[in-house]
Amino acid sequence: MNMQDAIRTVFGKYAVFSGRAARSEFWYWVLFIVLVSIALSIVDGMLIAPMTGHEAFDPEAGQPLQLLFNLATLLPTLAVSVRRLHDTDRTGWWILLGLIPIIGNLILLWWYIQAGTGGDNEYGPPAIASD
């Protein structure tokens, strides 16, 4: 699976919390989110801030494009994260572990890095992607 396929798959399963997501799908999605967030932060700082009467990159100017992007990708990000946990044979409710500062996110990161279970598990057949 390449990055374009991963993005298409995640947006195609916008709010689908069932099934499984391969490592490549999850990590390409994370890369996409990071790259777009950086680009939008630059655009917000260079263009939007001066248009609203602030200095370029003024922290008080806000980042409206970044906010809209975050809102638009919140649900698919949660969905692909839950599907990734399913691929490691864990319930999606473990995503709530991320609410525990530092330790919870480190545990989730460890699980996201792990290879998925081979063959079917209780969440269905493996996601179609080569990890």
Image (cartoon, rainbow, N blue to C red):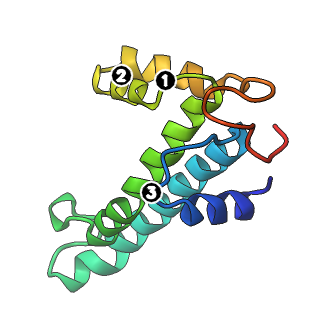
Local SS, label 1: helix
In the rendered view, tell whether residue 90 sits above or below residue 131. Answer: above
Could you tell which of marks 1 and 2 lies nearer the N-terminus? 2
Could you tell which of marks 3 and 1 lies nearer the N-terminus? 3
In the rendered view, tell whether residue 54 sits above or below residue 29. Answer: below
Local SS, label 3: loop
**Mark sitting on residue 108:** 1
* Kind of residue at disc 1: Leu
Question: How many circles with numbers are drawn on the protein?
Answer: 3
Alpha carbon of mark 1 to alpha carbon of mark 2: how far?
Answer: 7 Å
Q: Position of residue 13 (x, y in %)?
A: 55, 59
Name the quarter where the C terminus is drawn.
top right
**Mark sitting on residue 97:** 2
Alpha carbon of mark 3 to alpha carbon of mark 1: how far?
Answer: 20 Å
Which of pointers 3 and 2 indicates the residue nearer the eye?
Answer: 3
Say if mark 3 contacts mark 2, CB within 8 Å: no
